[in-house]
Image: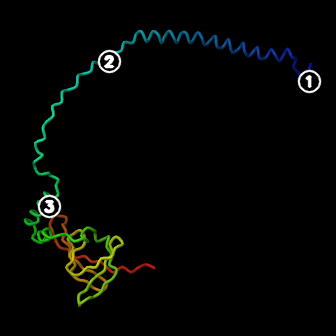
């Protein structure tokens, strides 16, 4: 005997015993595998695929586009004409607004504008407005904002304007708005 407590014959016996156990376990599985293979083969023979016959595609007959010469229903010109006609029928105040050329500051909402100063030149008051980090000089009679706003008065701390807006009932009415002088934050 050596100092480990097992003889050399005992050490060879353990791996052989383990190998025998594994082989007997695999032999038991092979009968299950044969049974599973037979069942699978039987199911394949019984199954008969039924694929429905595809219908031939329907013949496509293109229709000629006959409205190419007609007025585009989404054109800006058509919309402008319709708005002008509606304005003339509904409110003469709006009709005068639609018949004039738009000014550059009418492209911006009043919320994007800030009054940053005012001055008088030749007895006429002017205001300085900041829009998109650019400074614009305006006077009484100029138009601002997207609601047909027209400047009616310029003071040292305020620009007053009249806007033409549509109320909840769809009627066009005038409303007064103003831009206050903005103090620069330090």
Residue 181 % position (x, y): 33, 81
Q: Nearer the viewer, residue 144 or 12?
A: 144
Left/right placement of residue 28 relative to residue 154 reads right
Name the spot of residue 62 as percent of width and height, x first: 15, 34
Q: Are marks 3 and 2 in contact (CB under 8 Å)?
A: no
Closer-to-camera residue (19/119): 119
- What residue is shown at x 64% (from left), y 10% (from top)? 27
Instruction: Name the residue: 26% across, 88% down.
Output: 121
Question: Would you name the residue on which mark 1 appears?
Answer: 3
Query: N-terminal of the two: label 3 or label 2?
Result: 2
165 relative to 182 in the view: left or right: left
| Residue drawn at point x = 48 percent, y = 12 percent | 40
Q: Is residue 52 left or right of residue 35?
A: left
Q: Give the distance between the C-alpha atoms of the residues marked 1 and 2, in whole angstroms.
A: 75 Å
Q: Nearer the viewer, mark 1 or mark 2?
A: 2
Q: CA distance from mark 1 to mark 3?
A: 108 Å
Provide the residue designation for mark 3. Answer: 80
* Closer-to-camera residue (33/101): 101
Secondary element type, mark 3: helix
Report the residue at 31% width, 84% height from top: 118
């Amino acid at each position: 005997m050596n100092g480990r407590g097992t003889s050399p014959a005992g050490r060879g016996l353990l791996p052989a015993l383990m190998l025998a156990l594994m082989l007997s376990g695999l032999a038991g599985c092979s009968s299950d595998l044969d049974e599973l293979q037979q069942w699978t083969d039987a199911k394949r023979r019984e199954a008969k695929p039924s694929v429905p016959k595809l219908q031939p595609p329907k013949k496509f007959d293109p229709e000629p586009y006959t409205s190419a010469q007609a007025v585009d229903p989404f054109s800006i010109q058509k919309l402008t004409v319709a708005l002008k006609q509606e304005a003339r029928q509904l409110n003469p105040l709006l009709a005068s607004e639609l018949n004039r050329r738009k000014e550059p500051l009418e492209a911006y909402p009043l919320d994007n504008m800030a009054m940053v100063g005012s001055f008088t030149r030749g007895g006429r008051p002017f205001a300085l407005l900041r829009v998109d980090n650019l400074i614009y000089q305006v006077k009484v009679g100029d138009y601002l904002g997207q609601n047909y706003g027209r400047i009616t008065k310029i003071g040292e701390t305020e620009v007053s304007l009249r806007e033409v807006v549509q109320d909840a009932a769809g009627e066009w009415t005038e409303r007064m708005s103003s831009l206050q002088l903005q103090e620069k934050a330090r």
